[in-house]
Image (spheres, helix red, strand yellow):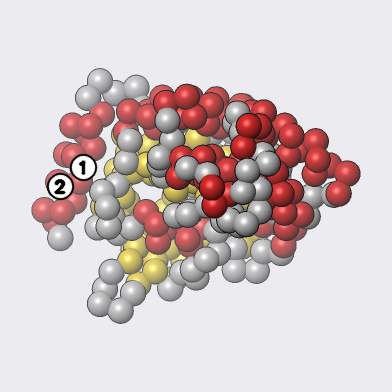
Amino acid sequence: MTEHALALTDVSRTYRGGAGVQQIDLSVRRGEIHALVGLNGAGKSTLMKLMVGMLRPTSGRIEVLGRSAADAEPATWSRVGALLEHPLIYGELDGRTNLQLAARLRGVPTAQRGPMVEAILAELDLGRYAAVRARRLSLGNRQRLGLAAALQHQPDLIILDEPTNALDPSAVIRLREALLRRAAAGAGILVSSHHLDEVARIATRISVIAEGRMVGTLDPDGIDIERAFFALVHDAMART
């Protein structure tokens, strides 16, 4: 078993007009929560789409759970849990059925799906919405349902883009505890966020992206983490 759940080496993805990400080196070790922070348009979403195979890099190498992302088999991707941009849920299906379908798509054996779904409903306090059609849920509860689908199968690699979007304080705390439990069990976790104070509560490492490049790291235990973040971003933008 490799030390890293995710490893990007010299990864670039260039769009027409020059935007994208350039020469990215980034890793997520098993058992750690690695936070990725940056301003809007910095390249976070592009980078995370590359990590989960939604985009292919122009150059460089991406390894997911020890396998090249370019030719990883479904069995490898089934060990990944991801939520990018919008939760992948079906509006006409209720919460429980959405989760059962997500488990099936990840190859979870039939006998395990029921207990798995009930466990995540309890963990994220979604039981009261289990029989409610997803289209009737609030934005925050749809987000919680998407997170439940990403976490329920106890993946070895978790990739979440702005996971606390629309969550109320209680749901944020439950998510924080769920991620810490999975990291303690050995999962590698990458989380992008605009909320420096929130990621600093759980992150082992914090990397900063600006103008499509990695520009430095932040100390999660730093005294003035926001000032350090903006200093890194300002310096990066001044060099472009």
The residue type indicated by label 1 comes to Leu
Q: Position of residue 110 (x, y in %)?
A: 86, 49
**Circle number at residue 232:** 1
Nearer the observer, 93 or 193:
93
- Label 1 residue SS: helix
Q: Position of residue 85 (x, y in %)?
A: 44, 54
User: Which residue of the protein is positioned furthest toward the bottom in this rendering?
Assistant: 16
Q: Position of residue 148 (x, y in %)?
A: 61, 41
Against 183, residue 91 (above or below) is below
Nearer the observer, 182 or 107:
107
**Circle number at residue 235:** 2
Q: Is residue 79 visible from the viewing direction of this image? A: no
Is 232 situated left or right of 64 in this image?
left
Residue occupying image coordinates x 48% and y 62%: 50
| Viewport quadrant of the N terminus | top right
Q: Are marks 1 and 2 in contact (CB under 8 Å)?
A: yes
Q: CA distance from mark 1 to mark 2?
A: 5 Å
Residue occupying image coordinates x 71% and y 64%: 73
Local crowd at mark 1 within 10 Å, few (<14), some, or many (≥20)?
A: some
Residue 218 position by quadrant: top left
